[in-house]
Image (cartoon, rainbow, N blue to C red):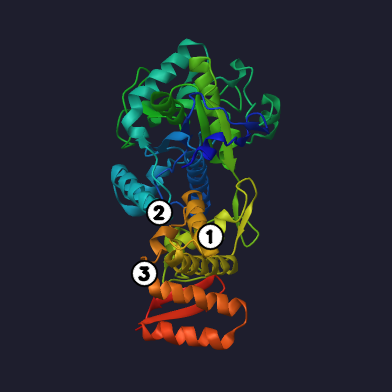
Amino acid sequence: MNGLAKTIRMKLYNTLTRKKEEFRPIKKGKASLYSCGPTVYWFAHIGNLRAYLFADVLRRTLEYSDVKTKFVMNITDVGHLTDDADAGEDKMLVAMRREGKSAYDIADFYTQAFYRDLERMNIAFPKKFVKATDHIKEQIKMIQQIEKNGFAYRTSDGIYFDTSKLHAYGRLSGQKAEEKKAGARVEMGEKKHPTDFALWKFSPSGRGRGKREMEWDSPWGVGFPGWHIECSAMSIKYLGVPFDIHTGGVDHIAVHHENELAQTEAAEGKLQANVWMHSEFLTVDGGKMSKSLGNLYTLDDLMKPRGAGSGSAGKGYDPLAFRYLVLGAHYRSKLNFTFEALDAAQNALTKLRETVALVWQLVDDAAFSTAAKGKTLLKFDEVLGLGLKDYVAKPLQVPKTVMKLVLEREVARKTKQWAESDRLRDTIAAKGFVVEDTAHGPNVREKR
């Protein structure tokens, strides 16, 4: 990169302050990023992938601006309750019944499926994936610190965070505690307040290890961590506190990220991250995406050969066509997914690939403006991530004498000397080359 990139000033919208701010990394020229990854009891759907793509474009933009990134993403491979209110069934137990596999086998299978989806979407892997099951000790240690600082209490089913003790609780979502309580529809049980949440849950009935496969010993008894604690503990371990940027989907703002922020402040007395960024929802045909509606699509659904499967999925699309579609909307705007829109994205991507293959043949010839366009297109793709360099045609070794004739013919065409243009085309053909006129300039290839 040239020196110009180093002068770029970047503004980011910070959910925490609800305004755009000039990005000033904690360490000059470096940025620490943490992104909430998948809960690996099922495939990631295309709405999830939009959030991961947003984080990828953010990282690419920083790198393009000569800001080196340290990017960490968690893998939630611990079973958690299906309800944000610490109620319902364990997601991993549901998957175990569905598939007849162990919790660890399920977690590994869907983790590998997630990695495969990232590769298909050309989403660069973070510097480090961190798994919740590998960091139980760190989570226990953080809960102990929260407890020591007076922000936790014990019930018969677990250790809970007391949200009333943290004055700033609710600032990420912009909701005051009383507003959250008024809108909360949760079973209170022994919780002191509706917004309180589990830090550690005891195994059912406290009777040891019979009912759960994923459980661990702790100072409070056998159990498993609450959903939110893993991200607080692991982000501190790998990025410190505070770090620069935390990303995720908008669905995480009111509960998961609000609780992460609270835990870290209660344990460390500091903000978890300086900038919080969130991507909007993906809708389908103007409505909500859900399994019950039959419109919850995975990348595999989009990639199925035409006519395969059932419903309107199974279109045989290139995964990067979906990437192209997502890039067409601002990350903070809702994006409506339709197969008509995906068709258009597929066609546009195909044309773009054809264009970059064509113009690159002229990249070494300064006489053609398309050469500069080709270089610019590939430079843009460092951020867009459409993999256009894979479609660059290998440079054709065209003799200087032939290129001289091509240039002369282009001058003849522009001055409307059609007879001379035809003569030069025939002379070029006699030397074993074909010149084709395109909207991007002349394309020279060997005569077949």
Residue at coordinates 31% horizontally, 31% vertically from top-left? Answer: 134
Secondary structure of residue under mark 2: helix
Residue 186 visible somewhere in the drawing: no
- Counting from the top left corner in percent of width and height, residue 431 is at 36, 82
- Which label belongs to residue 396? 3
Name the amino acid, label 3. Leu
- Counting from the top left corner in percent of width and height, residue 386 is at 47, 57
Left or right? Give the position of 97 relative to 190. left
Name the amino acid, label 1. Lys
Secondary structure of residue under mark 3: loop
Secondary structure of residue under mark 1: helix
- Which label belongs to residue 67? none
Looking at the picture, does residue 280 appear above or below residue 8?
below
Of pointers 2 and 3, the one earlier in the residue sequence? 2
Name the amino acid, label 2. Asp
Left or right? Give the position of 301 relative to 112. right
Q: Nearer the viewer, residue 32 or 65?
A: 65
Depth check, mark 2 against mark 1: the one in front is: 1
Label 2 close to label 1 by CB (< 8 Å): no
Say which residue label 1 marks. 373
How far apart are the alpha carbons under marks 3 and 1? 18 Å
- Which label belongs to residue 117? 2
Looking at the picture, does residue 144 appear above or below residue 304?
above
How far apart are the alpha carbons under marks 2 and 1? 31 Å
Residue at coordinates 48% horizontally, 83% vertically from top-left? Answer: 424
Residue 183 visible somewhere in the drawing: yes
* Badge 3: residue crowd in 10 Å (few <14, some 14–19, many ≥20): few
